Image (cartoon, rainbow, N blue to C red):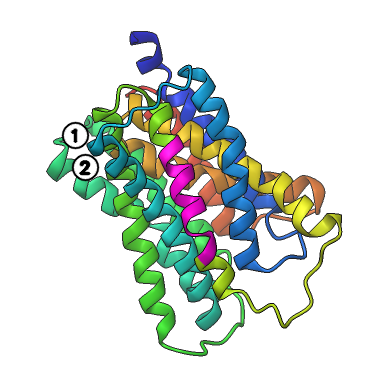
Amino acid sequence: MSQKKHNWLLYALVTMVTWGIWGAFSDQPDYPATLTYVVWAISMVPCALFALANIKFKLDVRPKSVLLGMGVGLLGAGGQLALFQALKYGPGYLVIPMIAVAPIITVILSAIFLKERVSKFGVVGIALAFVALVCFSLSGKSDESVTSWLWIVFASVVFISWGVQALVMKLANNYAPDAESVFVYMAISGLVLIPVALAMTDFSQPINHSFNGPWLTFCIQILNAIGAFALVYANRYGKAMIVAPLGDACAPVISCIISLILYAHVPSVPQIIGIVAAISCVLILSRE
């Protein structure tokens, strides 16, 4: 057990890498966003089956475990659906920066309800994580226009949902005897919201059914699912107020590096500052 506790950073780094690769290629498939959600929910199933096999299919079915596990999943999946709506009414350069700093909610709630504390050195690491988040958010500006003030309503739902999710994930891990049960309920809750995503889909528009549609989407979304699986372990053995900003701040670094290599993308000044801040964040928090 002590060795697993020591490996919280390894799990967080797996999340960082898989989400970074996912972020770099997530816009490649020619597929509707709502149907991408459906594919994402389905991509959670193989990881959930692996999780079940890992605990010999002895799923924790106590009511509190089910409630907390489903709560984690519904907060994450519900936030994802709200994000689709936010981007429908508002530009990404307004929406993304708002939800990118959702870990600040996790940090505050963890300090209040979980009584988590970090060293002064750790506080610097968390601060650097938010510097990286802001830098990568600023680097994504575009000339899109706002079509409705409703974007801020949906973006607020995402901001709150994802900020609270990390806290509930920690509570679920503290109660459940294993991290696998928590993830399985996350996967189930994602599947539960598939009808909602289908109802939001405009099937009157042409839908790409070739490889670069649903199949390529699945190949990319499975990385998201693996990252989420690792994140459950990271939250189980690490502090939520550290894991949340670490994962969210450092994944864009991987995305930026991939873009630099594959697409000859030259990092902007904010991105360079973000990369340095994120790497420094990892080095500092690895000492916690």
Q: Is residue 256 left or right of residue 64?
A: right
- Residue under label 2, please give it: 110
Q: Amino acid at mark 2?
A: Ser
Up-down relation of residue 133 to residue 58 (above or below):
below
The N terminus: image quadrant = top left
Mark 2–mark 1 contact, CB under 8 Å?
A: yes
The location of residue 95, given as percent across then percent down, is 47, 71
Q: Residue furthest bottom?
A: 147
The location of residue 17, given as percent across then percent down, is 60, 36
| SS at circle 1 | loop
Figure quadrant of residue 128:
top left
How far apart, in angstroms, are the residues tagged by discs 2 and 1?
A: 6 Å
- Mark 2: give few (<14), some (14-19) or many (20+) Cα within 10 Å: many
The C terminus: image quadrant = top left
Would you say residue 186 sits in the magenta stretch? yes
Q: Is residue 176 left or right of residue 213?
A: left
- Residue under label 1, please give it: 116
Figure quadrant of residue 63:
top left
